[in-house]
Image (tube, rainbow, N blue to C red):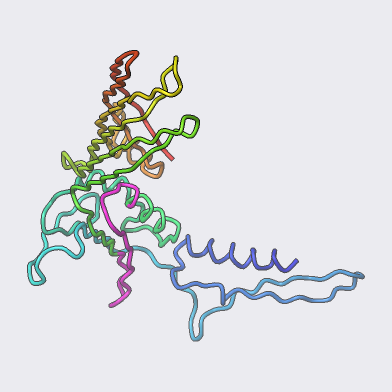
Amino acid sequence: NESEITAERERITNLLKNNGYYDFNQQYVNFKIYDTSRVNSLSVETIINNPVGGKHKRFSIDTVIFTTDEGKGAVNLPRTYRIFNQVTYKFYEEKYSKKILDRRLFIYPGDYFSRESTVETQRQLANLDMFKFVNVYYDTTGGRFAPNVFNSPLKKFQTTNEVGLGIILSQGFPGPFYNFSLKNRNVMGGMEILELNGRIGIEGVPAVTDRQDVYSSTEASVNFSLIFPQFVLPISRKAKSSLGALNPKTQVVAGYSLSNRPEFERSTFIGRFGYTWQ
């Protein structure tokens, strides 16, 4: 089965890529097929070839350098260095909590190279919604093996406006609406996100007694939400770090909505506290 041969080549490559063999690729994995003494039977030999003039090297990480503001600042202005949990952080301005960043980092000095840990680091840092891009580049010059984590920050404030015309298909009366949202990133320095969402809309609603008569109904709402990039729980720092791969978040929501119709006026207040993870 040729597809199983291909899958085995990929399995071996991933296995070695996740256990220190940074330079390994699928070209080093070959298969030979032999006839056997049995009828309609074959023997499969798996061969792992060495690189020309040497053998496969297993790479362990020397240092990890984490840049929080790639693409920012003056060209000749030096960045500040801080070390936290064996990782060197570089920045022009210390905006982000190194404790939170550390929980989304899965590559450390002394560890063997792992493609899976590298991809997971990029994924979880991107899930913070703080950076436009997250790149991990491995520096192998001078006999060193040092991953450089480059992060380009998103804008602190992000706004969205939407104006439209909605139609209730069962009744057929159009009405305008306006949606507004404001996102404030890194509110308290711990990579929290504060969101404000508002909506107001007017709908045409037929009267109950006479379908020819139409009156307007106004719907308005506003919601505030504060999102923490961790579980706000009385658990240890080690436990919170181990949960970093789950993209943990705590969300606190407060909101108000108003419905104003000829028959009634209704005000609703909501409050919600919850956890999400993936």
Q: Residue at x 11, y 62 (%)?
A: 79
Whether residue 270 appears in this view of the structure is no
Viewer-proximal residue among 243 and 20:
243
* Left or right: 79 in relation to 229: left
Whether residue 162 appears in this view of the structure is yes
Q: Residue at x 36, y 38 (%)?
A: 248
Q: Is residue 122 above or below residue 44?
A: above
Query: Would you identify the image quadrant in which residue 28 lies?
Result: bottom right
Instruction: Single out the residue that lies furthest toward the right.
Output: 39
Q: Is residue 84 above or below residue 271?
A: below
Question: Residue 160 at x, y = what percent?
Answer: 26, 46
Viewer-proximal residue among 168 and 97:
168
Question: Residue 140 at x, y = what percent?
Answer: 33, 74
* Left or right: 241 in relation to 70: right
Q: Is residue 261 above or below residue 68?
A: above
Quadrant in which the C terminus appears: top left
Question: Residue 42 at x, y = what percent?
Answer: 82, 71
Query: Would you identify the image quadrant in which residue 34 lies?
Result: bottom right
Quadrant in which the N terminus appears: bottom right
Instruction: Single out the residue that lies furthest toward the bottom.
Output: 53
Viewer-proximal residue among 89 and 194:
194
Tell whether position 263 is magenta. no
Tell whether position 143 is magenta. yes
Question: Residue 138 at x, y = what percent?
Answer: 33, 68
Residues rendered magenta in the picture: 126-147
Q: Residue at x 42, y 36 (%)?
A: 167
Q: Residue at x 32, y 48 (%)?
A: 104
